Image: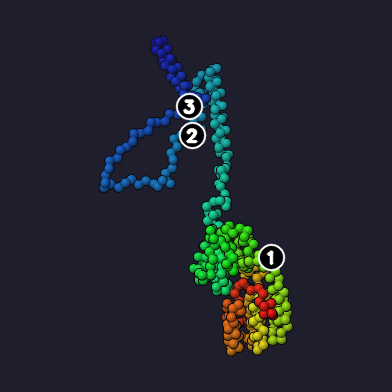
Amino acid sequence: MRRTEIWASNALLRLERARLREITWGVVAVKRPAPPPPQVEKFDAFSRPPVQPPPSEQLPRNDTPPWHRVVWTSLRVVARRRPGKRGARLIALGIASALVLAAAALGLLLLPRDATPSPPADAGSPSASRDAIADADTTRSLAVAWLVENVAEGTIVACDPAACADLESSGYLATALVPLRIDDADIRAAELVLVTSAVRARLGTILDQLTAPTPLAVFGTPEAPVEVREVSLDGPDGYQMRWAGDRADRLSAGRALARARSLHLSKQARLHLLRGSVDSRILLTLPPLLASHDISISRFAASGPEGSRGLLRTVEIDHIDGRNIRDAAGRTAAAIGYFRSQRPPFLPSTVEVSSGAQGLILRVTYPAPSPLGLLSAKMN
């Protein structure tokens, strides 16, 4: 009987030692069950395949036991042993391990969910590049539409191949376009140049040396503008001198026209005449008409995208011989015939009757750009 008790005690001791070997720093290694053998399904051509959720709905399986269960199991095993020196060390190690795991878990819980910042959508991202290209195309389309509507037919325009294709598809005369290619980017044969980012890259500093100092029209943003510039073979300084001479002539002609008895001007229209802001073609075309009719002008105007030096190329007439445009149908027809009978550069691009702020008006518009030196040539 004594031998049986000793043998049982030794067996229990060996079993306890085996269990202690599974403890590492107070943590019990949890044995995972062996995976079941794979099931081989027989092929059946007439059976329906099993319905499986889409890949996005299949959650990954996590077989690792939670940390609190591991700690609790370890402490429970250690607590069952009789306390002693070796047992005291094991208990201390188990408590220390539990504290470390608890601190690690607390740190994970306190970490912010969005600690990793998402990369910002900077200028180098594909979406930003696509937006920049779309904005450039839109700005170029606005410039193309303005050229087709405001520039005289046959005016030679230099442009990059994409802009030239847009101009031609919009109805601009193909023979009046000068495509600026990499191997051939000469704007000296043109009268205007449509300045896009591609043109700036190809011409560089030559662009400023062969164009007017101020753009004729500007589109887009200051960071990425599209400009319409006049070509000046004598450079920006030569253009500046010609501009100053033409402005002096416009000031003199405008003041003389403002004193005409048969011309009636609104306050704003008179101010524009006295400042020399009116196109010289209007100043030269109105005097013959005033010789036979009393004309009332409501305003002089220009298109929106034109720069600070853009001249007022439109004149709006609201009365002829003291009668409004609706009642003076015969006189209005005679005035329309007079303007349409002119020859370039005095031929208007548009002569039409349209609605104004105070009723019907006769609107006469001349094409861009305004030629310089017409008044001095007329005087000579």
Q: If the image is split into quadrants, where does the N terminus sit?
A: top left
Q: Residue at x 45, y 17 (%)?
A: 13
Whether residues under marks 3 and 2 lie with C-beta atoms below 8 angstroms apart, the answer is no
Estimate how packed mark 3 is, as few (under 14), some (14 to 19) or many (20 or more) residues with alpha carbons within 10 Å: many
Tell me where residue 74 appears, x and y as whole percent: 50, 27
The amino acid sitting under disc 2 is Pro
Kind of residue indicated by mark 1? Asp
Q: Nearer the viewer, residue 43 or 364?
A: 364
Q: Earlier in the sequence, mark 1 or mark 3?
A: 3
Quick check: marks 1 and 3 in contact, CB under 8 Å?
A: no
Where is 72 relative to 305, above or below? above
Question: Disc 1 marks which residue?
Answer: 237
Q: Secondary structure at mark 1?
A: helix
What residue do we see at 62% from left, 67% from top? 230
Determine which quarter of the picture holds residue 182.
bottom right
Instruction: In the rendered view, tell whether residue 304 sits above or below residue 355.
Output: above
State left or right for residue 72 relative to residue 357: left
Within-10-Å neighbours for mark 1: few <14, some 14–19, many 20+? some
Vertical position of residue 325 compared to residue 120: above or below: below
| Residue at the spot of label 3 | 28
Residue at image position (65%, 85%) is 288
User: Three-letter amino acid code at disc 3?
Assistant: Val
Tell me the tag on residue 66. 2
Q: Residue 59's spot in the image, x, y percent?
A: 43, 42
Relative horizontal placement of residue 61, taking residue 287 as reference (left or right):
left
Residue 85 is situated, as x and y percent measured from the top left of the image, at 55, 17
Q: Position of residue 22 (x, y in %)?
A: 46, 24
| Circle 3: element type | strand
Q: Give the Cα separation between the discs numbered 1 and 3.
A: 91 Å
Mark 2: give few (<14), some (14-19) or many (20+) Cα within 10 Å: few
